[in-house]
Image: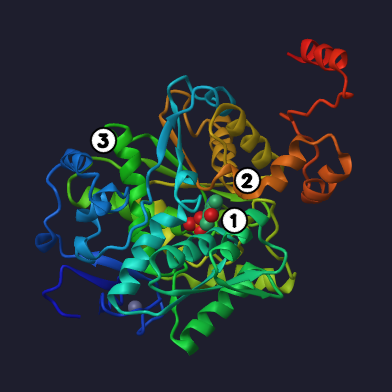
């Protein structure tokens, strides 16, 4: 590692701490195998003295790099020069004060905020990370990029490849595990799509092997540069709250990249004196893919100053294998049993005095319907954050007077199958898509009204139902 650099890569294990240059493409530490961080020498990087200084970027929206909701915060992720970033206009997202969803969650009017990451160009928060990974990939001259995906990472990767033409996309998906909305994006953008007979966890193992063997740049969230981009989701939340730190950030947990990135963002802001406290973090698993919940809440696994307690997780994974338990939830974006960022997430939970909860598919799909009825809408996995917030209010962990930000990770149109099945009058369709997931009822269904093609009947129906 050249010691004069502003940024370098560093092993997250404090007992190792090996350093690598940012000119390397690595997904783990050569010495000990642990995950890597992108770390900055802040004395050289010269971050702003005050978060308000970023408001000056609003007048520079004509510059693509400052129009970007990621790169207008470049000073807090300065691993590449600002004139070399790759951007397609990601991060134009909204923090909605969701007063019509607040009663469902159980917080006071004005206290619930929904952060709409579905407004990104490819329809999910993944673009925040992909712009950063692409910037890194281009800086080291990569020609092909690969990912394993439950759908949104591949849609994002395929889009960046199509728009920028910097690289060719190779995506790995599990069989039958991807929603059509997401698959259609990858195909439309022209990505080489490899469907593996297996689930996401299988695809993840294979894509690591293949990228190693063929020298393909890996853009899954084990890539530390991805998480640098995802830090800016928290910066935009703070920006929308006029730089006031909320009480809670609630986020669904799959591969745990987002939660890890959020924790790193707050650790750095604290270190730089740009905030005086971190919000509390709640990571929400689906019951059918609840590794983090099980390890953190039931088996007491903690970051513990970085001492790697591999026994606890290894024992759990052996149990999963022995019982052949596969991840299973209708929230396909978080249908993951072996989260690659587990250790970074444990660190984030410590930084943010975090909690982990699990919610059922019934709770997820009902919460999603509430978001649709009172907000801009989201895909099922995103509904987990709202369902989780509701659960934490019911438990008394979140107070009704708290300011709570739920991250809506993906767009409403990503998984129309689930939405249509929820609102349908067709029991067979409901059973097939939702019943098989243990969903018993559509508590907030808005059913289409069937009428004969007859003016009187139509008028009567409208009078009756409106
Ligand atoms: C990827 C994804 C998640 C999971 O995020 P992680 O960072 O892997 O925990 C949740 N929701 C949506 C919509 C996603 O695309
Ligand atoms: Zn190491």
Residue 13's image quarter? bottom left
For residue 46, side relative to residue 209 (left or right): left
Q: What is the quadrant of residue 404 in the picture?
A: top left
Q: On residue 380, which mark appears?
A: 2
Horizontally, is 423 left or right of 115 in the view? right
Q: What residue would you read off at disc 3?
A: 243
Q: Nearer the viewer, residue 166 or 98?
A: 166
Picture layout, residue 465 above or below residue 140 = above
Evaluate whether residue 374 shows in this view: yes
Q: Are marks 1 and 2 in contact (CB under 8 Å)?
A: yes
Residue 339: x, y in percent? 53, 64
Towards the viewer: 168 or 337: 168
The first of marks 3 and 1 along the sequence is 3
Q: Quadrant of residue 206?
A: bottom right
Which badge, 1 or 2, is on the more N-terminal residue? Answer: 1
- Write the residue at 50% across / 45% down: 118
């Amino acid at each position: 590692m050249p010691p004069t650099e502003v940024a370098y890569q560093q092993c997250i294990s404090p007992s190792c701490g090996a350093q690598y240059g940012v000119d390397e493409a690595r997904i783990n530490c050569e010495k000990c195998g642990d995950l890597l961080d992108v770390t900055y020498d802040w004395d050289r990087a010269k971050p702003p003295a005050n978060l308000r200084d970023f408001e000056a970027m609003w007048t520079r929206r004509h510059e693509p790099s400052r129009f970007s909701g990621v790169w207008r915060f470049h000073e807090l992720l300065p691993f590449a020069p600002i004139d070399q970033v790759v951007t397609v206009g990601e991060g134009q997202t909204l923090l909605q004060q969701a007063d019509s969803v607040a009663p469902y969650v159980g917080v006071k009017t004005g206290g619930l905020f929904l952060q709409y990451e579905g407004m990104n160009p490819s329809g999910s928060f993944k673009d925040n990370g992909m712009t950063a990974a692409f910037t890194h990939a281009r800086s080291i001259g990569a020609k092909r990029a690969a990912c394993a995906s439950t759908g949104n990472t591949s849609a994002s990767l395929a889009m960046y490849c199509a728009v920028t033409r910097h690289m060719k996309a190779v995506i790995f998906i599990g069989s039958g595990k991807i929603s059509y909305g997401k698959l259609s994006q990858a195909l439309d953008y022209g990505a080489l799509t490899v469907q593996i007979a297996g689930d996401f966890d299988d695809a993840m193992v294979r894509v690591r092997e293949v990228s190693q063997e063929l020298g393909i740049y890996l853009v899954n969230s084990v890539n530390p540069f991805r998480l640098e981009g995802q830090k800016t989701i928290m910066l935009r939340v703070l920006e929308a709250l006029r730089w006031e730190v909320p009480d809670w950030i609630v986020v669904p947990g799959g591969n745990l990249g987002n939660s890890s990135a959020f924790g790193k963002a707050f650790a750095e802001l604290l270190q730089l004196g740009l905030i005086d406290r971190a919000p509390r973090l709640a990571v929400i698993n689906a019951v059918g893919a609840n590794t983090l919940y099980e390890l953190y809440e039931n088996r007491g696994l903690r970051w513990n100053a970085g001492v790697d307690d591999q026994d606890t997780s290894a024992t759990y994974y052996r149990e999963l294998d022995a019982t052949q338990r596969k991840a299973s939830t209708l929230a396909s974006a978080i249908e993951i049993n072996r989260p690659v960022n587990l250790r970074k997430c444990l660190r984030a939970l410590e930084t943010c005095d975090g909690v982990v909860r699990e919610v059922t598919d019934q709770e997820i799909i009902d919460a999603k319907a509430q978001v649709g009825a009172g907000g801009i809408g989201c895909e099922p996995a995103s509904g987990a954050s709202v369902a989780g917030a509701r659960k934490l209010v019911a438990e008394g962990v979140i107070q009704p007077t708290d300011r709570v930000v739920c991250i809506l990770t993906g767009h409403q149109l990503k998984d129309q199958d689930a939405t249509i099945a929820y609102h349908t009058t067709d029991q067979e369709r409901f059973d097939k898509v939702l019943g098989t997931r243990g969903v018993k009822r559509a508590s907030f269904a808005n059913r289409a009204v069937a009428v004969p093609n007859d003016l009187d009947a139509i008028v009567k129906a409208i009078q009756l139902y409106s």
